[in-house]
Amino acid sequence: GSLSTIEKSPPKPRREQTVLTIDTMNPTVKKVEYAVRGPIVQRAMELEKELSEGMKKPFAEVIKANIGDAHAMGQQPITFFRQVLALCSYPELLNDSTFPEDAKSRARRILQSCGGNSMGSYSASQGIDSVRHDVARYIKRRDDGVPCDPDNIYLTTGASDGIVTMLKLLVCGEGATRTGIMISIPQYPLYSAALAELGAVQINYYLNEQKCWSLDISELQRSLDEARQHCNPRALCIINPGNPTGQVQSRQCIEDVIRFAAKERLFLMADEVYQDNVYAEGCQFHSFKKVLFEMGPEYSNTVELVSFHSTSKCYMGECGFRGGYMEIINLDSEVKAQLTKLVSVRLCPPVPGQALMDLVVNPPQPGEPSHEKFIKERTTTLCALAEKAKLTEQVLNTVQGISCNPVQGAMYSFPCITIPEKAIKEATDNGQKPDMFYCMKLLEETGICLVPGSGFGQRDGTYHFRMTILPPKDKLKILLTKVKEFHQKFTQQYS
Amino acid sequence: GSLSTIEKSPPKPRREQTVLTIDTMNPTVKKVEYAVRGPIVQRAMELEKELSEGMKKPFAEVIKANIGDAHAMGQQPITFFRQVLALCSYPELLNDSTFPEDAKSRARRILQSCGGNSMGSYSASQGIDSVRHDVARYIKRRDDGVPCDPDNIYLTTGASDGIVTMLKLLVCGEGATRTGIMISIPQYPLYSAALAELGAVQINYYLNEQKCWSLDISELQRSLDEARQHCNPRALCIINPGNPTGQVQSRQCIEDVIRFAAKERLFLMADEVYQDNVYAEGCQFHSFKKVLFEMGPEYSNTVELVSFHSTSKCYMGECGFRGGYMEIINLDSEVKAQLTKLVSVRLCPPVPGQALMDLVVNPPQPGEPSHEKFIKERTTTLCALAEKAKLTEQVLNTVQGISCNPVQGAMYSFPCITIPEKAIKEATDNGQKPDMFYCMKLLEETGICLVPGSGFGQRDGTYHFRMTILPPKDKLKILLTKVKEFHQKFTQQYS
Ligand SMILES: Cc1ncc(COP(=O)(O)O)c(C=O)c1O
Ligand SMILES: Cc1ncc(COP(=O)(O)O)c(C=O)c1O
C-alpha cells in the first residue's frame, strides 16, 4: 500500500536538507543582472584558456572591448601617481634620491593625515580629512569658483559604492508608494542591478538615439507621468558623459533637467565619472553642480543633488584601486547624519584609493618638477582616446546595417545594428536575445568580446552592442575590421 | 474667514519641499547602529581638536582604545609586505637593487596576474586567480592538509564586505517566516547593523561571562527555540577569537556548535579574522573548516559554512587596505552562481588589498632573503600583544568593581564594571545608558576613549566597556592607571 511506499522511500535528496538554495535565497538578489560581466565575458575567458592550452580557433587572440578597464588594455598609469603611491606604501623610499621632490611632499602630506602615518590605518569613514579638502578645492576650481564644502564630500570605494549608498537612502514604501528611480535607457547596469537588489521601481526614460543620445525633457515627463500611476518617483539619475552611449549633454539640457527636477521634486543623481573624457569638437563637460549654482538661489538652495566621481576613468583609468568620491548638495542635515552613520559600518574606503583620488584632484602644478611629465602623459592618453573615438565612429559607419552616433565622450560606442529576421528567429528559438546571439557568434568566430545592447536596455525591436574604444590603436583597427567583416557575413548568412 | 487665512499662509517651510528627509528615508537604514564609531568617538575627536587649539583640559592627550586599528596606535607594518606593495605600485622599482629578490619575485607574480600587469585594472570579481590559489594553499597548510578549492575562495573588501554579502544572500520571507540570524551577545556591531539594514531578525545568544565568555550549547538551544516562535532562524554567526570578548573557543566547543548547526539545519558563519591573535597558554585557534572535516563526511559533506578572514587584524593590522577573503563550504551551486553574479556588480575588491592578502597567505619562506626579518617583525608584534593582553587583565582585576576575563585572543578586553545606583539614576534621568554615561565621563576627565558595553550588547543590568590592548605598552599602562583611578573616584562620588 501507499504507506509502505512512503516508509521505503530513499533518503531525502540532499537539496531538501540544504539551508540556502536558489528557492530559499534572497529573492531580490536573484533579480539582479549585470551584463558587463555576464555570459559573454565568461565564454571569452574560457576561449582564452582554450587558446593558451593550444586549442585551435579561427582567431589567434581574444580582444576584450567589453569593459571600461583602461590599464587592462595597455594604457600606462601616470608616473607621478604611482610614485606617490609607492612612497606612501613604503615610506623608506622617502630617503631615495631618485624620487622627485613633489612626489615626496605629496606622500608626506598624505601620510601625515593617516593614523600612525600609515595607509594601514582605518581612515575616518567619510574619508581622510585632507583629501576631502583637496577634493573641495578641485571642485571649486573646476566649477569656476562655485564654493564647495569639504563636509559635503564623502570618499567612496569606487563610484559604484557611492551610487549604491545614495540609492539605499532613498528607497522606502510599499506597493503604489514604493520608491521609483528614473534611469536612462540605455543605462550603465549598476543602476538596474542596485534597484533590483533594493527592491526599488526602475523607471525608464529613453535617450534620443536620433539626436545623438541626447535627453528630451518631454520624454522625462512621459516617463515620470506614467510611473506616478504605480509608484513614488523620487530621484532622477543622469550619466554624463554617457555610458554606454558616449554622448556629452549640453549646458542647456542640464539646465532643463535641473528645472524639471525642481518642478517635479526629484533628487538628482549625476554620474560624472567621465568628466575628463570629452573628445568631440564643440562639446564640453558641464557639471550639474556648476549649472545648478549658475541658475541662482531659487535652484541652488533647494535642489538636492549628488555627483559621483571615480579614479577608474578619465585619463588615469585606475580601476583596481577603487577610489572615488561623491559631493552632496542640499542634503537634509538629519539625512546627512544617517549617511555618515551608514558609511561608518563598513569602516572606511580603501586608503590607497583615497590617496589616489587625492592625487587626481591635486596633480603636479606648474613649476613643480613632475608637472611637465604629468601633462605630457595625460595629454597623450586623452589624445589617443579622442583619436580612437573618431576612428570607431568612422569605421562602424562604413558598414551597411551598422549605424553609430559620434563618440563625443566617455569610452564607448553603442551602435545600432540591423539583425536579419532569420537570425532573430533562430535566436528566439534558442531562447536567446538576438543581440546576445549576435555577440556570441562574433566572439566564437573572431575572438572579439563585446556586450549586447540588451544588457544596457534599448528600445524594443532595436539592437545594439557596446564596445569600448580602449584597445590600443592597432588592435582597435583589427577589431573594427573584424566586426565589419563579421557583420557582412552574418547579414548575408541570415538573408 | 478660513479661506483667506489659507490664502495668506506663508510659503511652505523648506522641509516639506525636500525630497529626502528623515521621515521619508529608508527606514531600515535609520535602525542601523554602530557604536565603534558612535558619539563617544565623535566627542574624542572634538576633544583632540580643542586640545590642539590650546584649550585647557584635565589631560594632555586623548588615548583612543576604541577601535582595533593597530597602525593608528603605532604598530609598524611588516617591511616585506610594504616593499612588495611599493614594487607593485611603481614597477620601475623592480630595477632598484636595494629591494630584496623575494620581494621582487612576489611583485612580479602579482603583476603578472593583473590585467595589463597593472594594479590599476579591475580584477575578476571573485578576486585575482593566483591570489585565490595562494589562499587555498594557505588554508590547506593551516588546517593540516584538509583540502581547499580555490573556486570556493572569494576575495573581499575587508571581512566586513564578505559578512554583509553572505547575510544578504540569506535574508528572505516576511513576518513569522522572516529570516533570523543568530549572533553572540556581546557581538561585533557590524552584525547587528547589517541585520537591521537587511531587515532580518537578530537572534541573540549570550556568551557565558562566568566561564570566560565561552559558548554553551544549551544557550544556543534556548535562543533558537524562542526565535522559532516568531521567525525563521537560518544562520548562526560565531566570532572566534572573540570581539569584543577576547575569548578563544575550544575545539570541543566548535565541534558541539557544528553538531548543533547540523541538527538544527543552520548555515554557519565563522568570523575568524583574529586567527593569529591567540595569547593565552593552553589556547589554540581551531578553524571551523578543519574541525568540520575532522568530524567526517556526515558533517563535512552537508554543513554549510563560510569563514571570513581579513588583512586588518592578526600581526599585520593593515586595516586601510581593505583586504579580506571568505571560503564557502557546501554552498549550493546555484546559490554560488548568484553570489558570483552579485559580487560582479561592484566590479572587484581593491587590488592593493588583494595583493596584501596574497602576501599574508604567502609570506617569505625559510631560505628566502626576507624570511628572518619577517619572522622577527611578526614575533615582536605578537609578543607585544600577548604581553599587553596579560597586563590589561592583571591591572583591571586589581580594581574593586571591575572584573575582567583573561584576554585569551583577539585585541580586546570587555570587563564588567559595577556602576553605583546613584550613577545609574543620574544617567537614566539624562536619557543616557549608564555605561555610556560612565565612558563619557571617563573621556571628559581623563581623555581615554573606550566604547560602552551597550554598543555590543550585554545581559540586562550588567555594564561593561570595551578597550583595545593596542596602545603602546607605556601608554597602555597610563591608560590602565587612569581607568583605575577614575573608577575609584567615580564609585566614591556616586556612593
Ligand atoms: C557610468 C559609470 N558609473 C560608475 C561606474 C563605476 O565605476 P567605479 O566603481 O570603478 O568607480 C562606471 C564604471 O564603468 C560607469 O561607467
Ligand atoms: C570580528 C570582526 N569581524 C570583522 C571585522 C571587519 O574587519 P575588516 O572589514 O577591516 O576586515 C572586524 C573589525 O574590527 C572584527 O572585529
Image (tube, coloured by chain):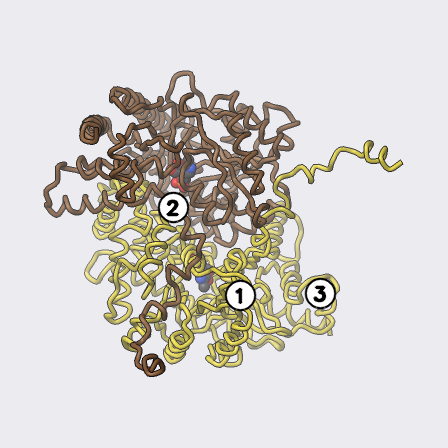
Chain colours: A yellow, B brown
Which quarter of the rendered picture does the C terminus of chain B lie within?
top left
Q: Which one is in front, A223 or A467?
A: A223
In the rendered image, the vertical position of residue B431 relative to residue B76, given as above or below = below
Q: Which of the 4 image quarters holds residue A255?
A: bottom left
State whether label 3 is within 8 Å of ligand 1. Answer: no
Q: Residues within 10 Å of mark 1 (few under 14, many from 20)?
A: many
Which quarter of the rendered picture does the N terminus of chain B lie within?
bottom left
In the rendered image, the vertical position of residue A240 relative to residue B164, given as above or below = below
Amino acid type, label 2: Glu
* Marks 3/1: CA–CA distance: 27 Å
Which residue of the protein is positioned furthest toward the top in this rendering?
Answer: B282
Residue that badge 2 annotates: B33
- Tell me residue B53's x, y (percent): 12, 48
Q: Which of the 4 image quarters holds residue B459?
A: top left
Residue that badge 3 annotates: A427
- Tell me residue A224's x, y (percent): 50, 74
